[in-house]
Image: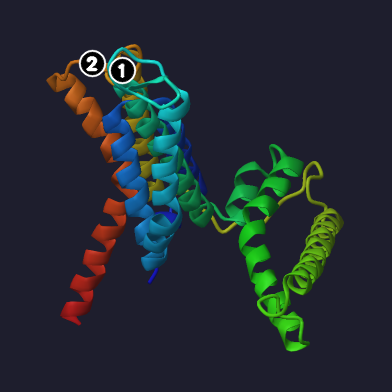
Amino acid sequence: MANRDTFSGYHPIVNFAYFALVIAFSMVFMHPYCLASSLVCAFSYSAYLNGGKALRFSLLYMLPMLIFAALINPAFNHEGATILTYLPSGNPLTLESIAYGAASAALLVTVIMWFSCFNAIITSDKFIYLFGRVIPALSLILSMSLRFVPRFKAQLRVISNAQRCVGRDVSSGGILKRAKRGIKILSIMVTWALENAIETADSMKSRGYGLPGRTAFSIYRFDKRDARALTFILACGAAVVAGGAVGAYYFRYFPTVKGAELSPARLAMLLVYFALGIAPVILNVKEDLKWKAIASRS
């Protein structure tokens, strides 16, 4: 069961700044601690947002992808000085290639999970609010793209049920008949998607979207709570950037595995990295405990 998210109630600038930083840092820093920290934070936030659905998605899709990506790299990448054995093809299997494959797999899965959280928090109205005046055409396209997948899935269920009611179920019959019915549903879905995009574009154009001087109604107000959250996010982001500049997150995989020596200053930088990633979960847990305390007193 999904939980009520407190962080999504913050100003869109706060939400976007957070995701911009955590996604960028997840793609830039390849230190094992950074990768593990980002993966844990992304999974924790996704699990909080979607409950058991996130766990099933991780087990059914993310875990196999993680294992596949980790195994495929050593099969093609043979760099590294620590040779463990030789493959039947005669190429060496190195410790460095295995470590880099695991790191790359963790990076891929982490970014996907962060974007799933981004899609849940940064709704189309928030995106248009942030970029509607700066890049109106592009922001409209991106907002339509963000909501396309869930709407496509919902419409696909409607069309499939309608086709099943008229005897065109894709789960029964011969292979050719099922393929023909599947192509029919796909054709309907493509037509629906194109018509929906044209109708949305015409609707926004008729309302004067993107015209100079056009005002827009907004329910978002930047208050002191948002200012404190944004200050914390930017301060952590600046600390992480500074840590990266001084080599606190340095780690190499070739020709040998080697990272920066751990010191109190570098440990503090690593803790700041984790604090930035886990911040929404902490906010949500704190708010849940507050509501439970209020409910217990009433």
Label 2 close to label 1 by CB (< 8 Å): yes
Residue 212 locus on image (x, y percent): 80, 41
Residue 16 locus on image (x, y percent): 50, 43
Nearer the observer, 264 or 203 = 264
Residue 147 quadrant = bottom right
How far is the residue under mark 2 from the one under mark 1? 6 Å
User: Could you classify mark 2 by the number of other residues whose Cα lies within 10 Å: few (under 14), some (14-19), or many (20 or more)?
Assistant: few
Q: Secondary structure at mark 1?
A: loop
Residue 149 locus on image (x, y percent): 63, 58
Q: Quadrant of the N terminus?
A: bottom left
Nearer the observer, 200 or 192 = 192
The type of residue carrying mark 2 is Ala
Residue 232 quadrant = top left
Q: Secondary structure at mark 2?
A: loop
Q: Reading the chain from its start, which is encountered first: label 2 or label 1?
A: 1
- Residue 123 visible to the viewer: yes
Q: Write down the residue under mark 2.
A: 260
Q: Residue furthest left?
A: 264
User: Could you classify mark 1 by the number of other residues whose Cα lies within 10 Å: few (under 14), some (14-19), or many (20 or more)?
Assistant: some
The type of residue carrying mark 1 is Tyr
Q: Write down the residue under mark 1.
A: 250
158 in relation to 12, above or below: below
Residue 166 quadrant = bottom right
Residue at 16 percent across and 79 percent down: it is: 297
